[in-house]
Image: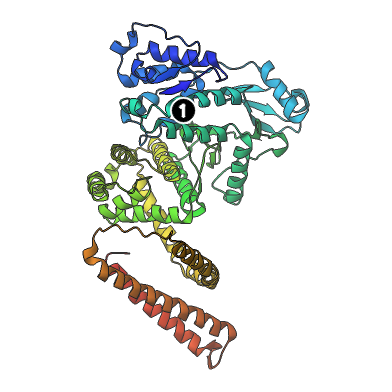
């Protein structure tokens, strides 16, 4: 039983939450709360309980609880791996429906942040263009004549959201069992993830850094328009950026009037997002139609940099392998890739998961490319993942979310648009870059440093192990699975490792000979250095063929 006492700052808010829960028939949840102090449970006839489904009652409750809960539900509407699909569909219907705050209450924030009144920054009063739960967006003109977009946090919104999250954390940690019946898994972890997400949104300095980084990556790219950041008028509460005069990508009629090729834009937008993921490993995580504008000269402009995704080189490699295995119609390896993208426990039935996921993937894998819808495939994948009570790691989820979203944008522009067809050449280019001569030499160049690092750290690591053995604290855990082939597998692995080390050593030695120009020379190239490269190349081909033939490439 969880205790909510009068030490919580907003007692009135707790009472309000209890009242709304009770009114919508969530008596099973309320019974799990042990109340201290002067909390009184209201009595209702549960008029909504008989007329609405569980998911509909959850949605109605969220709407009545206000902006923080709506924001949480909107985040969950994009996470079918955390909640049921039925609840996802209900949460997708949620709208902010927020009444704008008067500009008179916003104006003091400019004075606090910049020490200036609005008329000392802008030539005329700001024009409200959007209202959200945490802030308001205005269009303005700076004194130098530049048209800008200004996002301002609402007064006291940080305190309001912090208070709601504190309450949510206190009650959610005890509700896991009760909320499973409503299609919600791991309530406390969901609230923690939401807390991290909303805290990022509440700090416009992070969005400013995202915009600056994105601008640096694409400053020389003529296909894309990135809004300029006005640093002198940007703080943690206000962000000012260039106003992009463009057409929303969802407004196909207006694009046609401007003679903009919708098919070309669909392909270009998809390519730009894939480049962000597979080339820069830094991408716009929320490329919905409202966040993409098309300029008169057919440039794509991404706006709103509050949600960005970042993947490591290792995560990028896993994503490439997934697409590669799907293209090879190897559903089992693709299923294992997907499992490795989740927060799965060590005791999960791996074989069962791979069999079930293979069935899901094979339903799409053998269809024609035109019939494959990534959103449907992703929904089926996440439904299965949810059944195993696991979820995607956040960075991988942002990747899938971005790809699914941009596919929807592409299909809206061009009904014949197919993400699978368009992603294949991008993946092929990424693979070619990974295994290009330039990249291989770069890795060879870094190899001596890695060997030195290994030699530097190994003695300390061994010392730590020996100390644990000496103190009697050294433990070895063995899990006896598939031991029948382990001897052959280990022998084969060590043989391949030995060959790989010989190849690396030969390459390093040959590089030194070439660099030092050790005679005999042929056309200015050391004979032994050239021969060494040839031997290393031949051995590399044999090793690669051996791995490929064994089905492990």
**Quick one: label 1, few (<14), some, or many (20+) residues within 10 Å?**
many
Rendered position, 512 above or below 496: below
User: Is residue 249 visible to the viewer in this orientation of the structure?
Assistant: no
Out of 266 and 497, give the one closest to the viewer.
497
Rendered position, 461 above or below 304: below
Q: How is the image coloured?
A: rainbow
- Does residue 321 appear to the left or right of 202 in the view shown? left
Q: Secondary structure at mark 1?
A: helix
**Total labels drawn:** 1
Image quadrant where one finds the C terminus: bottom left
- Does residue 300 appear to the left or right of 140 in the view shown? left
Rendered position, 128 above or below 339: above
User: Is residue 544 visible to the viewer in this orientation of the structure?
Assistant: yes
Out of 121 and 244, give the one closest to the viewer.
121
The picture places residue 1, in percent across and down from the top left corner, at 40, 23
Residue at the spot x=50%, y=65% of the render? 461
The picture places residue 26, in percent across and down from the top left corner, at 36, 16
Out of 147 and 106, give the one closest to the viewer.
106
Residue at the spot x=37%, y=40% of the render? 391
Image quadrant in which you'd find residue 239: top right
Residue at the spot x=42%, y=76% of the render? 501
Residue at the spot x=30%, y=68% of the render? 548
Rendered position, 337 above or below 211: below
The picture places residue 187, in percent across and down from the top left corner, at 40, 30
The picture places residue 29, in percent across and down from the top left corner, at 37, 20
Residue matched to label 1: 72
């Amino acid at each position: 039983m969880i205790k909510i006492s009068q030490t919580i700052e907003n007692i009135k808010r707790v009472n309000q939450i209890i009242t709304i829960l009770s009114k919508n028939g969530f008596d099973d949840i309320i019974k799990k709360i042990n109340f201290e102090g002067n909390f009184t449970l209201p009595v209702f006839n549960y008029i909504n309980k008989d007329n609405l489904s569980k998911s509909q009652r959850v949605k109605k409750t969220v709407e009545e609880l206000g902006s923080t809960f709506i924001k949480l539900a909107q985040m969950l509407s994009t996470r079918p791996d955390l909640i049921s699909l039925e609840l996802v569909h209900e949460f997708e219907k949620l709208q902010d429906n927020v009444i704008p705050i008067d500009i008179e209450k916003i104006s003091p924030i400019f004075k606090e942040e910049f020490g200036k009144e609005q008329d000392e920054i802008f030539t005329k009063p700001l024009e409200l263009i959007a209202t959200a739960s945490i802030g308001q967006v205005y269009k303005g003109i700076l004194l130098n004549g530049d048209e800008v977009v200004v996002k301002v946090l609402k007064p006291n919104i940080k305190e309001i959201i912090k208070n709601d999250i504190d309450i949510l954390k206190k009650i959610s940690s005890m509700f896991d069992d009760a909320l499973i019946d409503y299609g919600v898994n791991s309530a406390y972890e969901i609230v923690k993830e939401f807390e991290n997400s909303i805290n990022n949104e509440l700090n416009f300095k992070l969005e400013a850094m995202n915009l600056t980084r994105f601008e640096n990556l694409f400053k020389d790219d003529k296909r894309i328009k990135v809004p300029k950041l006005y640093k002198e008028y940007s703080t943690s509460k206000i962000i000012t950026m260039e106003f992009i005069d463009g057409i929303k990508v969802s407004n196909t009629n207006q694009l046609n009037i401007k003679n903009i090729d919708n098919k070309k834009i669909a392909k270009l937008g998809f390519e730009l997002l894939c480049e962000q993921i597979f080339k820069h490993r830094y991408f716009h995580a929320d490329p919905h139609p409202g966040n993409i504008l098309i300029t008169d000269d057919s440039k794509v402009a991404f706006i709103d940099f509050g949600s960005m995704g970042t993947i490591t080189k290792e995560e990028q490699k896993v994503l490439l392998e997934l697409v590669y295995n799907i293209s090879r119609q190897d559903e089992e390896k693709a299923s294992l890739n997907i499992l490795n993208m989740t927060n799965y426990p060590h005791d999960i039935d791996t074989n069962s998961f791979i069999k079930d996921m293979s069935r899901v993937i094979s339903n799409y894998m053998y269809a024609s490319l035109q019939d494959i819808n990534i959103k449907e495939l992703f929904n089926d994948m996440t439904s299965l993942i949810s059944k195993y009570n696991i979820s995607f790691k956040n960075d991988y989820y942002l990747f899938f979310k971005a790809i699914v979203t941009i596919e929807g944008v592409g299909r809206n522009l061009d009904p014949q648009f197919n993400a699978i067809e368009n992603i294949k050449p991008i993946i092929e280019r990424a693979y070619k870059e990974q295994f290009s001569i330039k990249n291989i030499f770069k890795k060879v160049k870094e190899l001596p440093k890695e060997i030195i690092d290994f030699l530097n750290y190994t003695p300390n690591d061994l010392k730590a192990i020996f100390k644990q053995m000496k103190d009697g604290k050294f433990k070895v855990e063995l899990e006896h699975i598939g031991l029948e082939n382990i001897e052959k597998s280990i022998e084969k692995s060590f043989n391949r490792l030995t060959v790989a080390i010989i190849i690396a050593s030969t390459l390093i030695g040959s590089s030194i000979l070439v660099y030092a120009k050790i005679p005999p020379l042929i056309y200015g190239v050391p004979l032994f250095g050239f021969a060494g490269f040839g031997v290393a190349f031949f051995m590399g081909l044999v090793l690669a063929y051996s791995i490929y033939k064994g089905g492990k490439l």
